[in-house]
Image: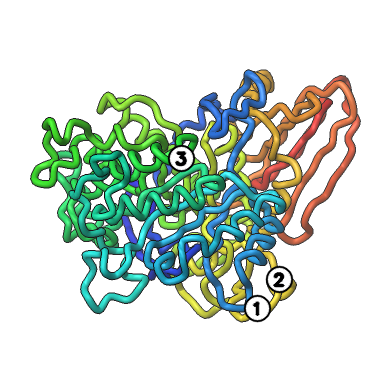
Amino acid sequence: MSDAHAGAAACVAGCAASGSPGSSGGQSGTAASAGSGSVDGPGGTADGGDSATGEMGSVYGPKYFRFGDNPGYYGSGIDRRESAQMSVAAGASSLRTTLPEYYLQKWGDAIEVDDYASYLPLGLGHHVCFLIGPSHEHSNAPADAQDYELAHYSPKNLYEPIFSADGSVNPNNFWAAYVERVAKNYGPYLDMYEVWNEPDQVGSNWQATEAWDKTPPNAKDLIWWNDSIFSYIRMLRITYEVVHKFDSDASVTVGGIGYGAFLSALLRYTDDPKAGAVSADYPDTAAKYFDILSFHYYPVFGGGSSDVGVEGLFTARDDYRARLKAAGAGERQFVVTETGAPRYAVGGNVGGADYSANYLLKVMTLGHYQGLVGIDWFAQGDGAAVGASSDSFAYMGLYFDYSSAMQVSDAKLSPQGQAYAWLKGWLPNTAADPGALAKLDLPEAVRGAAFLAEGGHHLYVLWAHTTMDESATAKCSLPAAGTATVRTFSVEHGESVAMVEPGAGQIALSLTGTPTVIEVP
């Protein structure tokens, strides 16, 4: 879901959650702001924050970026290792996974250890795992709840002591014991533990969020949590303390939130069960219990072009950052564990093949440039066959619907999947270089980013700024001391590569709304 910003009409539409391991568990969204966000001027400015792994490309900023994917479950014909092969073929370098407690209880704690180990040789690592889904006996869900509904109700026994007197995890604190099991078995493969999925989900009742800047959310409004915000903060606290006991290199993040007012409430209250007040037993607000801030953002409800969507995502990021600062909570890194755009305009929402491909290319490029830890695309596969659904979320997949596929070769990349695969050929292993971009003095009609690539050459990603659709054009030039490699992409024709000699030390470019990539010596 996306954040509701000042001046943006809020419009929320929910999606049914499959609850299957590996699934995102559904999502919803509000209208994106059409503001400029933090993309200052023609190109934007880089955050320059630390890398999630400590791998610094240079003084310019973080080299590592999670090109992520929400793989999901699309039928019995494709197993997890085959799904991972498809993730790589679609351009991903990292996965957002899940290991619900009810799933581990049924199949054993180590059920996916070998699968996770198999991802690394494929080039997949630095995974996020969202923790969710207590077992039936450990859940506050109704007794007749289906497995997927366990992702919508809080765990029991959250207020049991987290640790026993000897320092071991208290088995009667069911959530703490579950987190320990995940950390011990899967810690070597995980960078981040995400606590739940969209705990601030309110469905179409977005009006409920308008009071959260001053009062705590009502449990009945939190339809994917069904408990108080104080209990959610308690779960954050438990996760934070257990993860950092057993997996000290990992980070804990909130569960892909969508409303800035929910973050403000987290920063205002403690895990005191009655009123979230500070006391000796409950000394800290939620700010103490997460290392990174995860949020979800979908531009589909806001209309406009791919650039409007990207600008809306960074406006949301800036809103979260401002709320952290206002609460005295300090800086945090950001990760977007769900975003996506549909290649069909359905349900009265924006969409299109060029729109979805361009949004993916731009949001990944600027996400890396602006110092996000990573972005996980939603989703790996479509949720319906072409023409079978009026839900925009059904057509965001990197692959067309492959629910009936029996082997990897049966699955076909969608336009946005083709764009992601193209991006993989040039953007990884680069470091943001805002100084190089500033020297271009780009015209207002051009957007983009600059990176320092391995080998010391520069890579520029530039495009004509779009507004209502993807049809913009613009011209600009950039300095080059030698032959430049110019890469372009189109949904219809894929990649084109041209070797261009500079004239008078300049490369002249004719840009469209789809990014052009220029590598110069």
Q: Closest to the observer: 368 or 362?
A: 368
Q: What label sits on residue 247 in the rendered view? A: 3
Q: Are marks 2 and 1 in contact (CB under 8 Å)?
A: yes
Which residue is disc 2 drawn over?
408
- Res. 30 in view: no
> Badge 1 is on which residue?
405
CB atoms at circles 1 and 3 under 8 Å apart?
A: no
Label 1's element?
Answer: loop
Residue 429 screen position, x and y as percent = 70, 35
> Residue 419 falls in which quadrant of the image?
bottom right
Q: Position of residue 471 (x, y in %)?
A: 63, 51
Left or right of 276 on screen, residue 510: right
Residue type at mark 3: give it.
Asp
Q: Position of residue 340 (x, y in %)?
A: 51, 55
**Residues tagged 2 and 3 counted as in contact (Cβ below 8 A):** no
At x 65%, y 46%, the residue is 513
The image shows residue 9, relative to residue 445, as above or below, that is below
Q: Earlier in the sequence, mark 1 or mark 3?
A: 3
